[in-house]
Amino acid sequence: MIRLLKQVFALAIVGVVTAAVIYLTAAPTEEKQGGNRRAGRFAGDGPVPVLVAPARVADVPVYFYGVGSAKARNTVTVRPQVDGRILSLNFKEGQDVKRGDVLAKIDPATYQAQLDQAAAKKVLDEVQLANAQRDLERYNSLTALSVAPKTIDTQRALVGQLTAQLKADDAAIANAKAILDYTSIVAPIDGRTGIRMVDEGNLVRASDVGIVVITEVRPISVLFTLPQQQLKDINAALAAGAVAVEALESDAKTVLDRGSLQVVDNQVDQTTGTVRMKADFPNANLQLWPGQFVNARVLVNTMSQVVVIPTPAVQRGPNGTFAYVVQDDDRVALRPITLALQNEKEAVVAKGISASERIVTTGFVRLKDGSRVTVSEPEVQPGGSNGTPPATISSAISAAPEAAAERPREHGKGRRKRENAAEAGGTKAGEADTRKSQGNATQ
């Protein structure tokens, strides 16, 4: 009896396994067919959705970009020219000063005394000269028998000597006055003061490092470099007139100030193959600061009335650059193009595209020459004026009928699992009852 029950239980297990194998081999075929139907829906020969932009005619500026740093046009380290004690500092750190403004005062007592001494020496020499001139007049009024000619000549030499001494006294007075003026330290240029290097009351000497540094920041210069290959165009632009230069932020987009090119260096740096250039900027609002790193953009030319297309429309292949042009029948034509200039936003087409043609800018994955397209309108948002939301891949997949058709098959599979579980449970219950009856018979 026990052997018979075991055989029945084994047959039941074999039946369950066979049913599962049959289901697993049949379901992938159905799912594969459904997948093929879905793939055919999206990978068929239907129109390709694209975005387009019209080619236009515009004036396009030609820029050269360089990297450099701002530099003060004039920088002066203010040093004392005489030794002495600083009586006062008449400026504040970071103050704008004008040429001739008094910055500091040095004790003038010693130098004033030297000036007074030179002035007194001149007065003494003037008195001596006047006396010598009177003696010479007396000698000249006497006869030759009363005064020897040698005496007259000696007196005339003395007058000349004292006259020369007066000129030396004038020079000594001027020198003493200049030294005295050096006790008042004035600003030699217009500019802004930095951090002072000495404090009031200190003893300074002419050999000291200085008192303060003045830099001219309005206007200001920018030194930058360009590759030597662009030197020819730069020289041609300078020969035609003033060359405009823009100082840009580190993002190479924000304009800090606008100026003009002043100097192109007279030689190329052989180690880097670049040429140094200098441009001046008004710097009215102090956008630029000495030592600041900036990007320089030089306007060398303006291309007049050229065909311009968006840069994303430019494609590259084995045969060169090309673009897709949308024709009147909503089909695209692959058009080889020649570019004259290209940047991150626009490309200048020298040959291949005419104005007002529609150029594909997005949706190149399924495009080929002659493909039919549908032009999407990116500016139309869901719930817009037409009331029809634009179709997306996710919404198309969720609405596919194949997904709904799979649900009954999943329910049938679950029902078969529950029936097999119930059959196995009944078999185990019957086996337990058989064991129990056999035990009772033995007893």
Image (cartoon, rainbow, N blue to C red):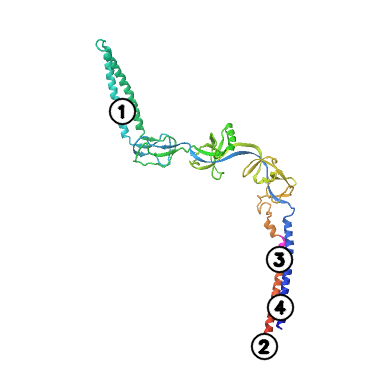
| Residue at (59% x, 39% y) in the render | 63
The answer for how far apart the CA atoms under marks 1 and 4 are is 138 Å
Q: Secondary structure at mark 2?
A: helix
> For the residue marked with disc 2, what is the amino acid?
Asn
Work out how far the residue at label 4 is from the one at label 3, CA to CA, in angstroms: 32 Å
Tell me the tag on residue 440. 2
Where are the magenta residues, as a range?
A: 400-410
Residue 118 is tagged as 1
Give residue 408's mark: none
Give whichever of discs 1 and 3 has the lower sequence position: 1
Numbered circle sitting on residue 407? 3
- Residue at image location 33% in from the left, 34% down from the top: 108
Rate crowding at label 2 as few (under 14), some (14 to 19) or many (20 or more) other CA atoms within 10 Å. Answer: few
Marked residue nearer the N-terminal end (1 or 4)? 4
Which of the two discs, 1 and 2, labels the residue nearer the N terminus?
1
Name of the residue lying farthest toward the bottom? 443
- Of badges 3 and 2, nearer the viewer stands 2
- The tag earlier along the polypeptide, 4 or 2, is 4
Comparing 18 with 126, the one in front is 18
Q: Real-space Cα distance between discs 4 and 2?
A: 23 Å
Residue 314 lies left or right of residue 190; in this view the side is: right
In the rendered image, the quadrant that contains the N terminus is bottom right
Q: Residue at x 69, y 59 (%)?
A: 397
Which corner quadrant holds the C terminus? bottom right
What is the x, y in percent for residue 352?
70, 41
Q: Which residue matches tag 4?
A: 9
Q: Quadrant of residue 189?
A: top left
Q: Could you give the CA–CA distance between mark 1 and mark 2, rounded to whole angstroms?
A: 151 Å
C-beta proximity under 8 Å, tags 4 and 2: no
Whether the magenta-drawn stretch holds residue 401 is answered as yes
Q: Residue at x 71, y 81 (%)?
A: 5
